[in-house]
Image: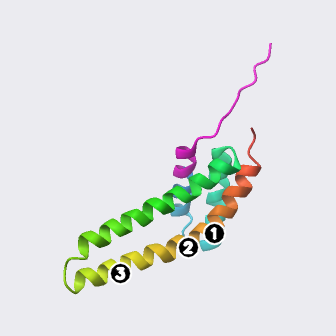
Amino acid sequence: MSSEVVRRGNVPQAMAWMIGLSVVLFWMPLLGSLIAGFVGGRKAGGVGPAVIAALLPGVILLLASILLGSVLGWIPVVGQLVAWVLGFGAWVLGFVNVIPLLIGAAVGGATAKR
C-alpha cells in the first residue's frame, strides 16, 4: 500500500504568494521579483500555471488603472493629469516587474515537484 500524496498546483494561491512577496520585497527591484516569481511558480506546480499566475495580476492592475483613469478623467485639468500619471505609473511598474517575475515563475514552475 502506497501513501503517496499527490500535490497539484493552485493558480490563485500562486498569485497570492507572488503579490505578497512582491510587496514585501519591493526594496529589491529585480531580485525581489525573481524570488516572488520563483516561489509562486513552485506553488503553481508547472510552467503554464506559473506564467498565468504571473500575468494575471498585471492584467488586473491594468484594468484597474484604466477604470480609475476613466472615473477621474472627467475632471477638467486635475483629473486628466491624475489619470495620466496613474496610467503611466501602472504601465511602468508593470513592465519593470513583469519580466523578472515571469523569469522567476518559469524557473520555479519548471522545478516544481509534480
Q: How many marks?
A: 3
Q: Which residues are magenta?
A: 1-16
- Residue for point 22% across, 87% down: 77
Determine the image quadrant of residue 87.
bottom left
**Furthest residue in direction right, as rendered:** 1
Q: Which amino acid lies under the numbered mark 1 shown in the image of this protein?
A: Ile
* 7 part of magenta stretch: yes
Cβ–Cβ under 8 Å for marks 3 and 1: no
**Furthest residue in direction left, as rendered:** 75
Residue 78 x/y as whole percent = 23, 84
Pointer 2 local density, CA inside 10 Å: few below 14, some 14–19, many at least 20: few
Q: Which amino acid lies under the numbered mark 3 shown in the image of this protein?
A: Trp
Magenta span: predominant SS is loop
**Furthest residue in direction top, as rendered:** 1
Distance (Cα) linking label 1 and label 2: 7 Å
Determine the image quadrant of residue 112.
top right
Distance (Cα) linking label 3 and label 1: 23 Å
Q: Secondary structure at mark 1?
A: helix
Residue 18 x/y as whole percent = 56, 55
Left or right: where does residue 14 sit relative to residue 114? Answer: left
Q: Earlier in the sequence, mark 2 or mark 3?
A: 3
Q: Which amino acid lies under the numbered mark 2 shown in the image of this protein?
A: Phe
Residue 27 in sight in this render: no
- Residue for point 25% across, 76% down: 73
* 64 part of magenta stretch: no
Q: Secondary structure at mark 3?
A: helix
Q: Which residue is mark 2?
A: 95
Residue 107 in sight in this render: yes
Q: Which residue is mark 1?
A: 99
Cβ–Cβ under 8 Å for marks 1 and 2: yes
Q: Which residue is mark 3?
A: 84
* Quadrant in which the N terminus appears: top right
